[in-house]
Image (cartoon, rainbow, N blue to C red):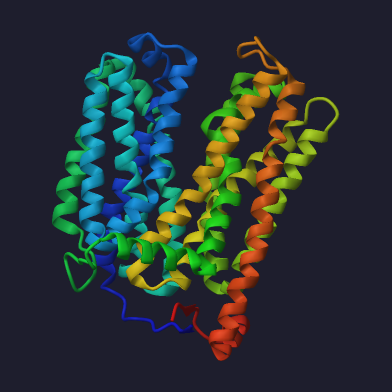
Amino acid sequence: MSAAVELPPAPARRAIAVWGVALGVYVLAVFHRSSLAVAGLAAADRFGISAAQLATFTMVQLLVYASLQVPVGLVLDRFGPRRVLGTGLVVMTLAQIGFAFADTYLLGLLARVFVGAGDAMVFICVLRLATTWFAPRRIPLVTQITGFTGQLGAVAAALPMTWALSTLGWTRAYLAAAVIGIVLALLLYVVVADTPERRVVTGPALSVATVTASLRAAWSEPGTRLGFWTHFTAQFPGTVLGLLWGYPFFVRGEGLSPTQAGLLLTLLTVFTMSAGPGIAWFVANRPFHRSTLVLGIVGAIVATWTAVLVWPGEAPVWLLVLLVMAAGIGGPASMIAFDFVRTFNPPDRLGSATGIVNQGGFIASLLTVIAIGVVLDVLTPGAGSNYSAESFRWAMCVQYVLWTVGLVQVWRFRRRTRARLAADDPEAYEAFRRRSGPVPTHR
């Protein structure tokens, strides 16, 4: 490895314009991903489905998203972010139009599959554009802003979508959401370019040999694996609470009112959004200790969950607030994973490496969501949604399995990453460790 060579930054206004349009597409993607949360009852009535079938909409959508990260990363390296981002936006828009008119469960499920497919093409393209349009020292902050600004899509999917469904009805509400995609597609076509020098960048043609070589090279890099396990370990606690199990745990497991549970989930989003700038500052100014920060934040999450689970009886509200604070901070902490990718991979395989890393948190989230449900059903068979507080406490303990695996792997691959850097370029390693030089990049 060698010290980074900082290229002259693109003109600030143009860089912000390109990133701003791409960020708008990401906010819309999060909106589409989250819009079903407030439409659950309406969807159950429209399609005549059970609660399990309703949950399948979300689970299938996330499964498609996670499974497409590596293929999308490879396509990104081949065709560049502008074309891949545009394709994702078109797929999401058409899928939402289809969902607006779907009148059977299978058609609705198919539409959500394509929503997940389009969504899968967005985030890593926005990160690639940030990498090519901003100076290296600014990238951690831009990455964090991208992550927490995307949460505005979830906010917009709450009250505005609730109003639209009650006022406009199912079809017109989802069509209105799809129209936003058409507007953003026009802006993307006019404003976004792959790099400051070229509107479109095309990589080497894809073949079995090149795909295999790219994935093998990305995965063999310890920095990529450090990023994967960082994302795996830090993201899932907040996602599991916000996606499905937070509300029932707070109401059934901790005896809170629905209003109190809703406020805690709102605080989860607030803490997720507010922690990003501070973490970005730390990453930019203490890059050698990025993994130490990850270990500390995950340790705080584990400690607060342990306090909640061992508390005799129902945990006090102040402790539950600390819980959602720690879990919320885990979201921006997981974004550090993409800084590892940028640092330790060359530009021609950033897409494939980012796709590999972006799978980590979603794989962990899906495993945890499913495992919690299985434990609840085993401990309270035939109870429907009337799970006991005791069953919730045992079910939430499945998180310790993933934390143990993730923390061991983060520790393991941070040592390997540092050892490789020290062996390949001792001077760069020492400068990096002392913060007297720029962040090293891949050789």
Say if 33 sits above or below 8 in the image: above
The residue that appears at 22% across and 26% down in the rendered structure is 98
Kindly indicate the quadrant of the structure image that contains residue 174: top left
The x and y percentages for residue 134 are: 34, 70
Kindly indicate the quadrant of the structure image that contains residue 314: top right
Would residue 403 be found to the left or right of residue 17 on screen?
right
The x and y percentages for residue 224 are: 50, 64
> Which residue is outermost to the right?
312
The number of discs equals 0
> Which residue is outermost to the front?
209
Would residue 436 be found to the left or right of residue 391 on screen?
left
In this view of the protein, which residue sits in the foreground, 256 or 70? 70
The residue that appears at 23% across and 39% down in the rendered structure is 91
Say if 11 sits above or below 316 in the image: below
The x and y percentages for residue 280 are: 52, 63
In this view of the protein, which residue sits in the foreground, 137 or 382? 382
Would residue 122 be found to the left or right of residue 40 on screen?
left
Say if 192 sits above or below 110 in the image: below
In this view of the protein, which residue sits in the foreground, 220 or 333? 220
Would residue 127 be found to the left or right of residue 329 on screen?
left
The x and y percentages for residue 127 are: 37, 59
The residue that appears at 21% across and 49% down in the rendered structure is 86
Q: Locate the C terminus and report the quarter of the image it occupies.
A: bottom left
Kindly indicate the quadrant of the structure image that contains residue 218: bottom left
Q: Is residue 129 visible?
A: no
Q: Is residue 34 visible?
A: yes
